[in-house]
Amino acid sequence: MKNINIMWNISTICNFNCDHCSYANKITNKNFLNKNQIFKIIKKLNDAQKKIDKDIKVGLIGAEPTQLTFFKKVVKKLYYSNLKIGITSNGGKKGKIIEVLPYIDELTISLDGPTKKYHEITRPKGSFKIVSQNIKEISKKIKSMDKEILFSINCVINNKNYIVIDEMISFAKNLGVDSINLLQNIPIGNAKEKDYELEVKNHLESVKKVAQEYSKKSKSISINARFTRPLAKDYSKKVLGLDFPKHIHGCGAGSYFGLITKEGNLYPCDRFDPNVYKEKYFGEQNYSLLDKKFFEIWNMKLFHHSYTIENKKETFLNYYPCMNCKYLGIDCTPCPAQLIQENKFGHSIICEAFLEKIYEEDKYEEKHCKERRY
Ligand SMILES: C[S@@+](CC[C@H](N)C(=O)[O-])C[C@H]1O[C@@H](n2cnc3c(N)ncnc32)[C@H](O)[C@@H]1O
Ligand code: SF4
Ligand code: SF4
């Protein structure tokens, strides 16, 4: 049975102002929940943990968790509440991270390129040197500790840095991390209406570069190519003749994933819009962990409506190209939120492009075989 993974937008403060930040419009530089409210929510999570025999992992993520003045206290409180802990940080404050290492299970630091030129397209000027050096030092520190911490780099792939995606993988390996998450740029917040979303040709090129790098370095760093879809593996094998790292796409919203918002509400995911649900399905609801117990919200109908794999299979079974795809519901559970909130599916342009290239290859093989036969 899968563990429960909770992402918590615990802070509304950030020391960076990234040009692609999906969270940008929520940064207020004054925290929304105070320490007592945060501790109250941790107590609810601890009560929930006592009721189940799987782990609840709490990932402190947005905006910049290390900017909380009582950051260490929060981490220790989570630790002594028997919760697994992950932290995602911009890596600007090394000291704040090092002092919580004894308590955490996973650490992710964002680095958007292997050089100043590429990283600082989206991240603040001067941050490359500081963050890359901090990653190196934190990695050394983790290796010297008698504790297992999964250390990863997050790199959001855009129309400019994709060109060095292969260098980025080797750079991450040399910094000493265990894995690299190559993320898809989501056009929200500061990234809205910017030219960051990968064009199809750049996406295909990125898949090729990752596959080439994977064939060299697969044993030393784990590559999670989250910017693409599982069908990339078939495209890579058939068209490029290269292996591609396996990855699982999609969310477990409501089944094993949840989000705690800056206000302390528990939602199935960060795309969830309670107003749409209110109108369409369930009326007025209270999702606040300040008022309710964890499982009172987690077991609400909305968490199981359209967010379970079965429902996603049903909906995406009617949608090309997912309808014919062997990965649907197994390695791929595409996001249903757009369907529910906007009455349309997110168009899977890249999978259509993969299939087109695969069909071209099939036709070539068919023709080639005929030519040989006659
Ligand atoms: C919102 S940040 C919060 C944590 C921390 N401040 C940081 O930058 O790592 C969490 C992750 O989301 C990524 N991110 C930010 N904006 C994004 C966007 N528009 N699309 C996809 N990922 C994004 C960041 O690069 C980071 O790895
Ligand atoms: S991506 Fe992270 S570091 Fe950058 S502005 Fe957003 S919250 Fe801050
Ligand atoms: S076709 Fe659909 S189900 Fe298959 S990999 Fe692409 S997005 Fe996922």
Image (cartoon, rainbow, N blue to C red):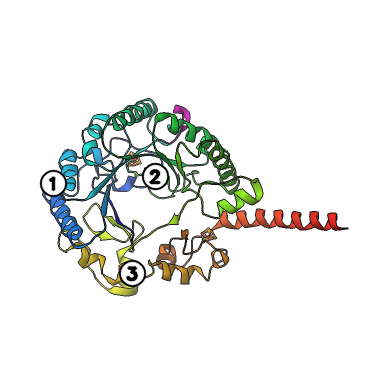
Distance from mark 2 CB to nearest ligand 1 atom below 8 Å: yes
114 in magenta: yes
87 in magenta: no
Residue at 54%, 41% in the rendered image: 210
- Badge 1 amino acid: Lys
| Left or right side of 75 for 1 | right
Determine crowd level at label 3: few under 14, some 14-19, many 20+ residues with C-alpha closer than 10 A.
Answer: some
Q: Secondary structure at mark 2?
A: helix
Which mark's residue is nearer the viewer, 2 or 1? 1
First along the sequence among labels 3 and 2: 2
Determine crowd level at label 2: few under 14, some 14-19, many 20+ residues with C-alpha closer than 10 A.
Answer: some
Looking at the image, is 273 positioned above or below residue 134? below
Tags 2 and 1 touching, CB below 8 Å: no
Which quadrant does the N terminus fall into?
A: bottom left
Determine crowd level at label 1: few under 14, some 14-19, many 20+ residues with C-alpha closer than 10 A.
Answer: some
Please name the residue that numbered disc 3 is placed on: 304
Range covered by the magenta-colored residues: 112-118
Please name the residue that numbered disc 1 is placed on: 35
Q: What numbered label is drawn on residue 190?
A: 2
Q: Can you give x and y, in whole percent of width and height, for residue 126 in the image? A: 37, 26
Which quadrant does the C terminus fall into?
A: bottom right
Q: Can you give x and y, in whole percent of width and height, for residue 235 in the image? A: 61, 51
- Seen from this angle, which residue lies furthest front? 146
Which mark's residue is nearer the viewer, 1 or 3? 3
First along the sequence among labels 1 and 3: 1
- Badge 3 amino acid: His
Q: Can you give x and y, in whole percent of width and height, for residue 87 in the image? A: 28, 43
